[in-house]
Amino acid sequence: MSRLAEFRALEQQLAAQLAELESLKNDDGLKREIEFEKKLRDLLGEYGYSLRNIVAIFDPQAASRRAPATATEKGSRKPRQLKVYKNPHSGEVVETKGGNHKTLKEWKGQYGSDEVERWLAQ
């Protein structure tokens, strides 16, 4: 696709989105929702409350239902595998579970990443 055709296609998409935005601006339902949100936020600010406080008032168990789900997600990741690299030039051995090892980075800078990956002990 030429740059001009790409430009015209994007221009048409933008015009369609602007037309949709204008129709939303004139929607009475949206205006009422915006007004409600503004009044709610003003009221929360007046009394020093946040949305979390309001949720805790209306549904005290909401926080306890959500907390275990995040704890299991963090614990579900399996541990990284230990990798052992042996430099054939110096005989030096590096054991690492990640690629952020200082010596490994130096080797990759000196010999290249592909070459160092060949040194991985199986």
Image (cartoon, grey):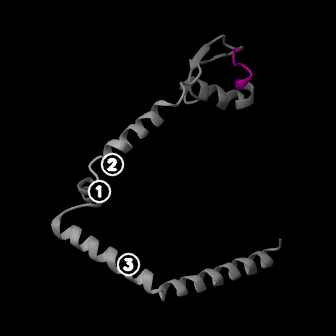
Query: Along the polypeptide, which appears first: circle 2 or circle 1?
Result: 1
Q: CA distance from mark 1 to mark 3?
A: 20 Å
Residue 55 marker: 1
Mark 1 and mark 3 residues within 8 Å of each other at the beta carbon: no
- Residue labelled with disc 3: 34
Label annotation for residue 62: 2
Q: Dot 1: few (<14), some (14–19), or many (≥20) neighbours within 10 Å? A: few
Report if residue 62 lies within the magenta region.
no
Q: Residue furthest bottom?
A: 26
Task: Say which quadrant the N terminus sits in.
Answer: bottom right
**Other residues around mark 2 within 10 Å, as few (<14) / some (14–19) / many (≥20):** few
Pick the residue in front: 24 or 10: 24
Q: Residue furthest top?
A: 91
First to last magenta residue range: 116-122
Magenta stretch: helix, strand or loop mostly: loop
Q: Amino acid at mark 3?
A: Ile
Residue type indicated by callout 2? Ala
Q: Amino acid at mark 1?
A: Val
Tag 2 and tag 1, C-beta contact below 8 Å: yes
Q: Residue furthest left?
A: 47
| Rendered location of residue 14, percent (x, y) | 64, 80
Q: Residues within 10 Å of mark 3 (few under 14, many from 20)?
A: few
Which of 120 and 46 lies nearest the eye of the viewer? 46
